Each structure stands twice: as C-alpha cells, then as structure tokens.
C-alpha cells in the first residue's frame, strides 16, 4: 500500500507537468491502474473479489457497485451543473461526443474516491450488500438487482447527508460540497484568475 501511495504521488507530480492532453491522460490512466490494484486489497469480505476495474459491462459484483455508484453521482452532478447555468457539453479533460455531458465526467473525478469508492468498501466489508442475493447477471455483465439498488441508494443518501468540516472551520453536508465545487468551477469559467481548486481528501 505504501508503494502504491508513493507511485500515485509521483504520477500526480508528473500530471502537473504534462504539456499536452495525451500525456495527461496517460498519467491519469497509470494512476487509475495503481489505485485500483490497491483498492482490491482493502476488501476484507471473502465473498467479494476484485482484481481490476471492468465496465461496459461490469464483470463482477464490486465493479457493478462502482459503476452504479458513479452513474448515480454523475447524474446528480449533471443536474447541479445545469442548475448553475453551465454548458455540460464543454469540459477541460473529457471530450463531448454523441451527446455526452463531458463536464459532469470532469467534475466527478474528484469525488469518485471519497464518495463512491469509500461507500462501496463500507457496504462490502460491513456485509450490508450480499454477493449472492443483491446482484443479477445478464448481457454478459453483473448488475445490482432491485434489493441491491435499494440498499446502495439508502446508504448513499445517508452518506451524502453526513457533515464534513470545511477549510473555514464550518460544517456542511456532502450534498452541499458538490454544489460549492460547481459554483467554484463556474467562477473559474467566468474569471480564470480565480484558479479552480478540486476537492481533495486530507
């Protein structure tokens, strides 16, 4: 785990020095591979096995939970982006194609680990989600079934209602954190001198 953290620090530093979009995506991909290799080691429930990220379709219960969680969070971010009057099809990293709201894909990146990934680990390790009863297999993939989705969404809403402490010493629910970040991004769009600071886990 310590080696993985060192590698991620190195890749983050390299990403900060990337001089073109392709190199930046390369560092991002390498970082994701390092991250997910360590993610599987955090699973203590023997009924769940995770050897790597798979999507479209998700290949196993862990990937099914990650994909579902990312989609729920992405949809919420898209709604907040539109409420702020931003064009969701213009982004910095992801490219808009076939009606894809690329800005939501940009802004979700800073929230994947602290919101979705941590919740998935909690649901698995606390044995709240059952590997046999809460999933279904079809079209070559694995997906949460009705009971699994209900369990996930209940836990997700509870997690998002939890309060965190801001840099100013105030407390705010995680729901509000998303909105504040989108407002900060909007301020950056209209006045680039206000550098955008993504949310980071301390």
Image (tube, rainbow, N blue to C red):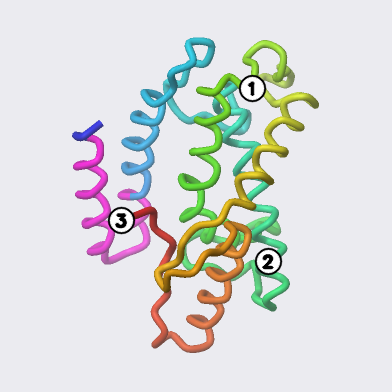
Mark 3–mark 2 CB contact (< 8 Å): no
Residue segment shown in magenta: 4-27
Q: What's the distance in space between the residues labelled 3 and 2, CA to CA?
A: 30 Å
Please name the residue shown 60% across and 44% down the image. 70
Secondary structure beneath disc 2?
A: helix
The image position of residue 89, as x and y in percent, is 63, 67
**In this figure, which residue is indicated by the disc labeled 2?**
80
**In this figure, which residue is indicated by the disc labeled 3?**
23
The image position of residue 1, as x and y in percent, is 25, 31
Secondary structure beneath disc 1?
A: loop
**Within the magenta stretch, is there residue 101?**
no
In the displayed structure image, the side of residue 147 where residue 37 appears, left or right = left
Q: Write down the quadrant of residue 60 in the picture.
A: top right
Q: Write down the quadrant of residue 55 in the picture.
A: top right
Please name the residue shown 64% across and 59% down the image. 77
Q: Nearer the viewer, residue 36 or 41?
A: 41
Mark 1–mark 3 CB contact (< 8 Å): no
Q: Which mark is residue 61?
A: none
**In this figure, which residue is indicated by the disc labeled 1?**
129
Q: Closer to the camera: disc 2 or disc 1?
A: 1
Q: Nearer the viewer, residue 178 or 49?
A: 178
Determine whether 78 is above or below 40 in the image. below
**Within the magenta stretch, is there residue 25?**
yes
């Amino acid at each position: 785990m310590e080696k993985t953290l060192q590698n991620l620090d190195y890749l983050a530093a390299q990403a900060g020095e990337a001089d073109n979009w392709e190199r930046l995506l390369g560092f991002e991909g390498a970082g994701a591979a390092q991250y997910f290799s360590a993610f599987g080691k955090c699973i203590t429930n023997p009924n769940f096995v995770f050897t790597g990220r798979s999507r479209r379709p998700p290949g196993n219960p862990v990937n099914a939970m990650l994909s579902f969680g990312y989609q729920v969070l992405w949809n919420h971010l898209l709604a907040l982006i539109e409420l702020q009057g931003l064009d969701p099809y213009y982004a910095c990293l992801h490219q808009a194609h076939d009606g894809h709201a690329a800005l939501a894909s940009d802004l979700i990146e800073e929230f994947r680990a602290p919101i979705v990934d941590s919740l998935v680990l909690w649901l698995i390790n606390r044995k709240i989600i059952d590997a046999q009863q809460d999933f279904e297999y079809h079209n070559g993939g694995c997906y949460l079934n009705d009971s699994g989705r209900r369990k996930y969404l209940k836990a997700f809403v509870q997690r998002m209602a939890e309060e965190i402490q801001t840099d100013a010493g105030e407390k705010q629910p995680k729901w509000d954190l998303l909105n504040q970040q989108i407002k900060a991004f909007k301020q950056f769009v209209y006045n680039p001198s206000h550098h955008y600071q993504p949310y980071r886990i301390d």
